[in-house]
Amino acid sequence: MSSSRVLVLNSGSSSVKYQLLDMSDSSRLAVGLVERIGEETSRLRHTPLATGASREWTGPIADHEAALKAVAEELAKDGLGLDSPELAAIGHRVVHGGKHFTEPTVIDDAVLAEIERLIPVAPLHNPANLTGIRTARHLRPDLPQVAVFDTAFHTTMPESAARYAIDTETADAHRIRRYGFHGTSHAYVSRAAAELLGRAPEEVNVIVLHLGNGASASAVRGGKCVDTSMGLTPLEGLVMGTRSGDLDPAVIFHLARVGGMSIDEIDTLLNKKSGLIGLCGDNDMREIRRRIDDGDERAQLAFDIYIHRLKKYIGAYYAVLGRVDAVVFTAGVGENAAPVREAAVAGLEGLGLAVDGALNAARSDEPRLVSPEYARVKVAVVPTDEELEIATQTYALVGRH
């Protein structure tokens, strides 16, 4: 295929993140962000990688179509316009693909309709993803558009892991099951971890810990996900920046009946006012660690709760997998917070886990092992690259058509 460029779009409700990649060598040509769409103070920040000199523009951007047109104008200034014959496809991040979408999919009207049908289980994300897709299709109707789903990597989970223990007919009627999220990251990182170990993905079992403001764990056996911590929504599982993670569901009934809170108020509490920010008022791990160093007990407790939950999931997924070759940390906290990695595996020496203090403390942007030579189970840090994964999957699919 002569054209080798892929534009990756991640459309939020009031933002568009984008990257243009050349898949002949997986290099980035441009990156950018449009934010505050629909406001008078919308902002576009665009960086062509050839020069590295960012351009910033502030002013009213009415909607996603105006945003994408502004992006196209910036790309055109660098000779990278959307009308370029070099552009092979546009790859879209779509948060929820349900059970139906198990792999990247060329978008047509039927695919759009199915993504729309999934809005009730992804009301915050799928509408914005759809807006981005429709806008891009309108601007380049001749170009293949590909949806890459956050949930797709987790569709290999067995029913024993994917189903909740509630009435089956009710669950099926309302699509209630564990879907998992961050799948694009888990797919990329688990494969990169196998490469770091010098083995094929089919040969290794890994536990991936994607720790950012949102956080999730996955158990990956031979390159396929067999369990993950997020569920019907991204609320389940680990303690996160603003989300509670695992919770007795009766807490919701209690807050409604005794606390007099509405469903919307409880939703806001659990998704936006819980997790680290609910425990100590901060959701930035760097600030929490600084406060701990200053002797702040509330910050220390928040950190301890975070680590306790993390350690439980490592142990649980060790049990699910039976044999573990590596525990892999990724995303903002996982890649940069050495104390989190150290604390998460402390005391798990009996399971073959340990970190080397010097290796763990050393900063690097490269995939690396931070465990000592003797460790039976390797501990690794692998920077995630969801945009590259979306571009790779998009290009591979378009190349087959």
Image (cartoon, rainbow, N blue to C red):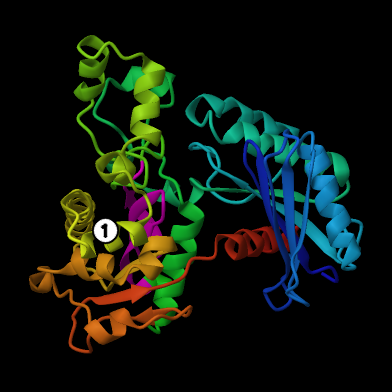
Q: Main secondary structure of the magenta part?
A: strand
Residue 208 within the segment the image draws in magenta: yes
Q: Secondary structure at mark 1?
A: helix
x, y percent for residue 266: 34, 22
Q: Residue drawn at (63%, 36%), measured in percent from left and top? A: 13
Q: Is residue 223 above or below residue 58?
A: below
Residues in magenta, as a range: 203-230
- Quarter of the picture containing the C terminus is bottom right
Q: Is residue 215 above or below residue 125?
A: below
x, y percent for residue 381: 37, 73
x, y percent for residue 385: 54, 65
Q: Is residue 209 visible?
A: no
In this figure, what is the number of numbered marks? 1
Residue 109 within the segment the image draws in magenta: no
Residue topped by disc 1: 291
Q: Residue drawn at (41%, 81%), measured in percent from left and top? A: 196
Residue projecting furthest to the front: 294
Q: Is residue 105 above or below residue 200?
A: above
The image quadrant of residue 108 is top right
- Quarter of the picture containing the N terminus is bottom right
Q: Residues within 10 Å of mark 1 (few under 14, many from 20)?
A: some
Q: Is residue 234 visible?
A: yes
Q: Is residue 290 above or below residue 154?
A: below
Q: Residue drawn at (90%, 64%), measured in percent from left and top? A: 77
Q: Amino acid at mark 1?
A: Arg
x, y percent for residue 313: 22, 53
| Near-viewer residue (25 or 53) | 53
Residue projecting furthest to the bottom: 373
Q: Residue drawn at (85%, 39%), measured in percent from left and top? A: 138
Could you tell whether 216 is left or right of 387 in the image?
Answer: left
